[in-house]
Amino acid sequence: MGSTPYRILTTGSRHWTDATAIKAAITDTLTEYGPDATVVHGAAPGADTLVDQVARSLGLPTERHPAQWRARGRSAGPIRNQQMVDLGAVVCLAFPLAGSFGTADCMRRATAAGIPVRVAHPGPPPAPAGPGPELTDRQVEVLADAARGLSVDEIAARLGIAPDTVKGHRVHALTALGADSMAHGVALAIAYGHLPADTALTARSTP
């Protein structure tokens, strides 16, 4: 007798690059619930793309739910997330990074629907070739706090500086690192050794 078919809901950052963590989360779920799974994702770059690749490599069917950005504007992501949640799943596998607001939204909706959420943490990215850019101690502190999910105001209060000063440190740090987002900057800071390899990248629970 075969196992009962079920759905695995996934959500994750557009900057997620750790396919190994995704494979581990999916295979752990298969071990627990059986092999007859369909893997559901939002068809976005980053984690969703890797989820699709990993699922197919494991011989699992996938269900893609791209957001209708042109038709629905900024509400497209939350609408898509709710649609995926409404279809049901035995678990939601989450792959967030700092600033992953869409991922955090999907996690909240899954929790509200009674779907258990399991959060994966990425391993450190490979170190880029060549020496890394120099960052000031304050810039590193701002990146570390951002990795913890603190807002600009929270970072400013903790460091005793103005919010605009925090923003300035953030801009200069991201420019020096060649990053296109805070999540990307934190990942590069880890790779260059400015932040510890075990730095936890946390998506904020609220936008």
Image (spheres, rainbow, N blue to C red):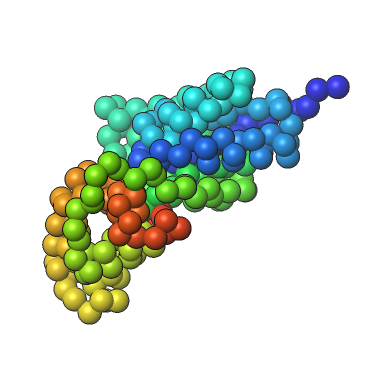
- Residue 91 vs 2, above or below: the answer is below
Residue 122 % position (x, y): 47, 47
Q: Residue furthest bottom?
A: 160
Residue drawn at (21%, 64%), measured in percent from left and top? 139
Residue drawn at (53%, 41%), measured in percent from left and top? 21
> Would residue 17 appear left or right of 84 to someone viewing this image?
left
Which quarter shows the N terminus?
Answer: top right
Q: Foreground: 186 or 137? A: 137
Q: Residue furthest front?
A: 130
| Snapshot quadrant of residue 68 | top left
| Snapshot quadrant of residue 202 | bottom left
- Kindly tell me whether residue 142 is visible in this rendering: no
Q: Residue furthest right?
A: 1
- Kindly tell me whether residue 95 is visible in this rendering: yes
> Would residue 134 appear left or right of 106 to someone viewing this image?
left
- Residue 83 vs 142, above or below: the answer is above
Residue 60 % position (x, y): 61, 22
Residue drawn at (14%, 66%), measured in percent from left and top? 164
> Would residue 85 appear left or right of 15 to someone viewing this image?
right
Q: Foreground: 178 or 132? A: 132
